[in-house]
Image: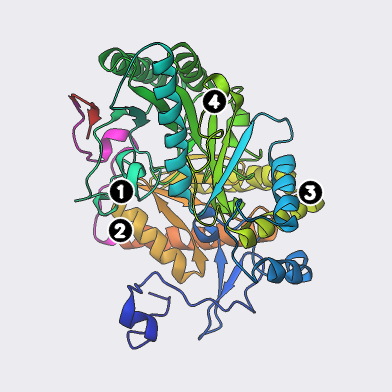
Amino acid sequence: MIFRRDNNSYLSNYMLIDESCISMDLDKSFGSWIVETQTQIKYLDMFSMYASQAIGYNHPYMIENLSKLAKASLIKPALPDVFNDIYEQYVEKFVQKTDPQNNFRYVFFIEGGALAVENALKVAFDWKARKNLQKGIFKRNMKVIYFCDAFHGRSGYTLSITNMNDPKKTKYFPKHKWCRIKNPKLRFPITEDILEEVIHSEEFAIRQIKDAITKYPGEIASIIIEPIQGEGGDNHFRAEFFKELRKISDEEDILLIFDEIQTGMGLTGKMWAYEHFGIKPDIISFGKKTQVSGIFVNDRVDEVTNNVFKQSSRISSTFGGNLTDLVRCGLILDVYEKERLLENTNVQGQYFFSKLNMLQQKYPEFISNVRGKGLFIAFDLPSEAIRNTLVNEAKRQNLIIGSSGYYSLRLRPHLNVTTEDIDRAINSLDIAVSKIQNQFARIKICFLPFKEHTQKKPPIVLSDHGIIN
């Protein structure tokens, strides 16, 4: 491996520093490039810290405004109970720039994406319980409808709605038995046969949802979905499916939650991915590129009195997010505006996509299902082993990329990525694929056709609480 691991380092004595870790030179890293501290080798970052970095490293505008970040970091106030003028200024900036159409009535900040999702669920649980009480119904056990291949976090409630092929994320941790639904994901390019298959999958998923609502009357508080499932395989869905979820949510007194922690803040070419689909969720969770995490909630929550936004401490935390993170987000939003980064995301995303399609034509036995919105990009490899080998070989070519789902490779460039960066990334991928093609050819690996059944997955069986893999 090319990343340094010093087993005698101080960190290694107290925490896991594995082979994928890198010591980053904070002063010399720049743009899309990470400079390793000891070797000073440059790595082209097409993963952007798990899609959490919006504008690359040491951006001039951020350097110019270090004093604003420094001032905000002198203390860590207990927000919003003890707020200040900086907080007021940057909350206003955040809301105005990320929700200019006023689609949402409330905003709530907290530290970490999992806690953002947890509080989205708490809003829904409280709302549904009060809805039931208005009807003279008392239900103790609220439930959530979620989807196969979902990743919503690693703590508390979110463990119960995370369904990954990697058992390390959830194994041995107690979970609620909520309603998991088959995800009717698209495959690309979309042919008539694929479209027909996906429509059937959507119909099956809708039947499952309606069956769950019938089986647990008055207990389904929310439907939660990622507009594009990131960790679970870069799975895309049709707008028609989201519109059905919206319709069901309206008809059945259910809150529709979009988890936008990875898709949000412009990565898909719009500020929020839901804007692509012609529907509006009731709640979105945000994090990663927003720096500070939290939720937006629309005025549907006001259908009940004394909801969580009307009662002190109903949802809360000590720090109420993080003031320094909020200021950093505000500065990043300035860069978005000055450099027209949403436009750049669409332009560079199309360019990246075209180059990947050329690689797919060059290596049809290796690369398939090239897909993406904006700079939220992925493609498939024939197997998990080949995918992992490609990730490692790319590192040897000084390119940082990531895995996704069973056998996908994901790319998450910074929003100010340049054409030159993309050309360099494509060249490194070309070299890496060529090398592993020769490697697997020598050991006579037989490549299977690119179909979903080429990956051995656990059987799907019905249970009392939905779908269990």
Find the magenta span and give its range: 440-462
Q: Nearer the viewer, residue 415 or 310?
A: 310
Mark closest to the chain's N terminus, 3 or 1: 3
Q: Residue furthest bottom?
A: 8
The residue type indicated by label 3 comes to Glu
The percent position of residue 205, horizontal first and vertical second, equals 35, 20
Of the two numbered discs 2 and 1 in the rendering, the one whose residue sits closer to the viewer: 1
Read off the residue under disc 4. 301
Read off the residue under disc 2. 440
Task: Say which residue appears at 28% left-offset and 31% top-offset.
Answer: 178
The residue type indicated by label 4 comes to Val
Read off the residue under disc 1. 383
Mark closest to the chain's N terminus, 4 or 3: 4
Q: In this orientation, does residue 391 appear?
A: yes
Mark closest to the chain's N terminus, 3 or 2: 3
**Cα separation between marks 4 and 2:** 55 Å
